[in-house]
Image (tube, grey):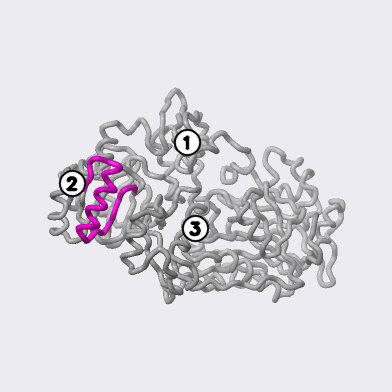
């Protein structure tokens, strides 16, 4: 191990001790003896302390005895090759690195984040925390977990809360878990560790992860622990860079886990599907879990073919051969979509096609006061301008939309929340409110710099799918707020830099499936029947997802299923294509737990 001169690695003797024979008991402490065969229930699974085991077989047996939908982690494993040899078909060596922060010397100061309060997790926080874990495909904690650990000295869980008084939503936007090794098993090395760090991928404030890490380090330093360790995936370059900046150094510690569908990607190795985008990949991974043959036809285009039991279906992400060309054309033409829905009594906004000379656009604006201009054919929010109120804005938006599609429509602006509802096989599978990208001022950076920073965070959080365009529409929204792109946004002032909430233009997505009003569910299912389409995403404008009022804006024949995890969108899609594989679905409500 290479260390920096003067670095503090107190506690390294624990890892040197890993060279001892298995039959040797752990080093005794000055107080009571070190406990043996120790594990700590962390809610998402057990943290198993490998150095407390005197038998490789006993350790292997405990790891294999993993609970349903849990993710156990055997940490500080001595002689991992010996443990793996006892059950090579069941266990695997986790491809993660271990980093240590010495706590006996000076540590980096916690950098407060404006509008964010860090506090201990409380009973009732489970749903808020699990929202973050599911957003990162991590294993959620069990019901009433925080109530059970209130008096457990070995566990510390901190949450970061977005304060309403500072323009926040009051939501929990970050969480981290700490384990006190001294309290857990009377650790002779006086250590601690950090686990399950997760930050809301849609949080407006940067620095939340760093603040949580250093706050936890400060608590363990106050408790006079010697170090704080953490485990991070070997390819998580962004997280590793942050930890190194905070003073963490890599140490030779190894982790073993049990093979299961939750962590399959960690032990099966790279696959040819790596070139697919996230929308195709989520479907392909679910198909493979069920033993369905996958053939990639064009990764860049998201084209693949699935084959099982003599049945073969070609797909482009969530668009399959089961969607007819006629159904697809009904969705593709927004004017046709609206007419068909209104014919059966479903609510849709007033709308006209713009004349070649634009002559009917201004009278329509005068009638409604606020309008939307968009290409009649298109997706991902391209060419859409929302909440236009002046003749100049409308004509400019028409020219912009016409560059993408000859047929341009102008539509009544409907105020409310942007709601996406996914319907698969006449069942509402997911619903999410989509919000426009919002920046928060710090009194230092210009608006265009803040947009660039938020855009980078959105790209990282969505596998490159979400980015705020620096185009005329963004500049228009900034001007409407009374600013220019070069202005410095005042401290804590928020600014919506787009009117549309589309993910691909920087919008954020917030799951509301459980809150959805029955009338909205019924309207979405009826609309899918009218369009005669098996898989569709509808854009609703609503006053509240839990209330009955709505207007259906458009339909998307190729919705992004990955945007709605943890709802079982990919599972329901494969159920539709290959109903005979339903019993082999790997959906458990959980996915791989990784350091994020």
Is residue 400 highlighted in magenta?
A: yes
The residue at 47%/55% (across/down) is 458
Check residue 187 for magenta coloring. Answer: no
Work out how far the residue at label 3 is from the one at label 1, CA to CA, in angstroms.
Answer: 25 Å
Describe residue 160's horizontal placement relative to residue 357 as left or right. right
Of mark 2 and mark 3, the one earlier in the sequence is 3
Do the numbered discs 2 and 3 sit on residues whose CB atoms are within 8 Å?
Answer: no
- Tell me the mark number nearer the camera, choosing from 1 and 2: 2
Q: What kind of element bears circle 3? A: loop
In this picture, which residue range is highlighted in magenta? 382-409
Q: Residue at x 37, y 33 (%)?
A: 320
Q: Which residue is mark 3?
A: 201
Q: Earlier in the sequence, mark 1 or mark 2?
A: 1
Q: Dot 2: few (<14), some (14–19), or many (≥20) neighbours within 10 Å?
A: many
Q: State the CA–CA distance, disc 1 to disc 2.
A: 34 Å
Q: CA distance from mark 2 to mark 3?
A: 39 Å
Q: Which residue is mark 2?
A: 354
Q: Earlier in the sequence, mark 3 or mark 1?
A: 3
Looking at the image, is mark 2 or mark 3 nearer the viewer? 2
Q: Nearer the viewer, mark 3 or mark 1?
A: 1
The residue indicated by pointer 1 is 300
The residue at the point 70 percent across, 71 percent down is 107
Instruction: Give the position of the N terminus as an image quadrant.
Output: bottom right
Quadrant in which residue 543 is drawn: bottom left
Describe residue 177's horizontal placement relative to residue 569 as left or right: right
Question: In the image, residue 197 lies at what x, y percent?
Answer: 59, 60
Q: Position of residue 265 (x, y in %)?
A: 59, 42
Q: Secondary structure at mark 1?
A: loop
- Residue 56 in the image: above or below residue 280: below
Instruction: Say which element carries label 2.
Output: loop
**17 vs 536, nearest the viewer:** 536
Q: Which mark is residue 131?
A: none
């Amino acid at each position: 191990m290479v260390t920096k001169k003067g670095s503090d690695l107190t506690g390294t003797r624990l890892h040197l001790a890993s060279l001892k024979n298995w039959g040797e008991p752990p080093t005794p402490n000055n107080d009571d003896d070190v406990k043996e065969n120790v594990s700590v229930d962390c809610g998402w699974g057990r943290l198993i302390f490998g150095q407390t085991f005197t038998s490789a077989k006993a350790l292997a047996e405990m790891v294999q005895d993993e609970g349903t939908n849990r993710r156990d982690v055997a940490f500080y494993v001595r002689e991992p090759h010996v443990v793996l040899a006892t059950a090579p078909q069941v266990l695997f060596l986790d491809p993660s690195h271990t980093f240590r922060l010495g706590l006996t010397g000076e540590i980096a100061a916690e950098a407060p984040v404006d509008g964010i309060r860090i506090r201990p997790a409380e009973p009732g926080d489970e749903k808020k925390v699990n929202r973050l874990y599911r957003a990162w495909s991590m294993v959620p904690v069990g019901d009433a977990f925080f109530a059970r650990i209130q008096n457990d000295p070995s566990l510390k869980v901190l949450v970061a809360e977005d304060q309403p008084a500072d323009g926040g939503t009051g939501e929990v936007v970050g969480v981290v878990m700490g384990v006190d090794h001294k309290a857990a098993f009377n650790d002779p090395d006086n250590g601690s560790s950090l686990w399950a760090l997760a930050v809301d991928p849609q949080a407006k404030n940067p620095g939340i992860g760093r603040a949580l890490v250093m706050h936890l380090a400060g608590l363990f330093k106050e408790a006079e622990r010697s170090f704080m360790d953490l485990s991070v995936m070997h390819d998580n370059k962004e997280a590793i860079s942050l930890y190194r900046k905070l003073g963490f150094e890599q140490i030779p510690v190894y982790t073993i886990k049990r093979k299961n569908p939750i962590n399959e990607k960690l032990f099966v190795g790279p696959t040819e599907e790596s070139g697919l985008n996230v929308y195709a990949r989520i479907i392909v991974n679910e198909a493979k879990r069920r033993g369905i043959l996958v053939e990639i036809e064009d990764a860049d285009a998201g084209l693949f073919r699935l084959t099982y039991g003599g049945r073969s279906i070609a797909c482009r992400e969530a668009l399959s051969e089961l969607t007819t060309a006629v159904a697809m054309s009904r969705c593709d033409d927004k004017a046709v979509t609206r007419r068909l829905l209104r014919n059966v009594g479903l609510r849709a906004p007033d709308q006209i096609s713009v004349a070649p000379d634009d002559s009917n656009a201004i009278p329509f604006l005068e009638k409604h006061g606020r309008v939307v201009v968009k290409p009649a054919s298109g997706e991902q929010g391209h060419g859409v301008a929302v909440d236009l109120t002046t003749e100049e804005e409308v004509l400019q938006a028409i020219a912009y939309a016409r560059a993408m599609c000859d047929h341009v429509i102008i539509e009544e602006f409907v105020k409310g929340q942007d709601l996406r509802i996914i319907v698969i096989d006449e069942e509402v599978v997911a619903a999410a409110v989509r919000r426009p990208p919002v920046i928060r001022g710090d009194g230092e950076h210009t608006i265009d710099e803040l947009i660039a920073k938020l855009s980078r965070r959105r790209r990282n959080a969505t596998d490159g799918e979400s980015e705020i365009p620096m185009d005329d529409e963004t500049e228009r929204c900034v001007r409407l707020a009374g600013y220019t792109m070069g202005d410095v946004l005042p401290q804590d002032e928020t600014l919506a830099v787009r009117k549309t909430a589309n993910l691909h233009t920087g919008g954020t997505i917030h799951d509301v499936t459980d809150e959805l009003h029955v009338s909205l569910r019924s309207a979405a299912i009826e609309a899918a029947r009218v369009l005669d389409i098996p898989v569709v995403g509808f854009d609703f404008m609503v006053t509240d997802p839990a209330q009955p009022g709505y207007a259906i804006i458009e339909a998307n024949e190729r919705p992004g299923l990955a945007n709605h995890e943890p709802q079982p969108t990919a599972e329901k899609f494969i159920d539709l294509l290959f109903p005979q594989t339903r019993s082999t679905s790997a959906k458990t409500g959980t996915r791989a737990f990784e350091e994020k």
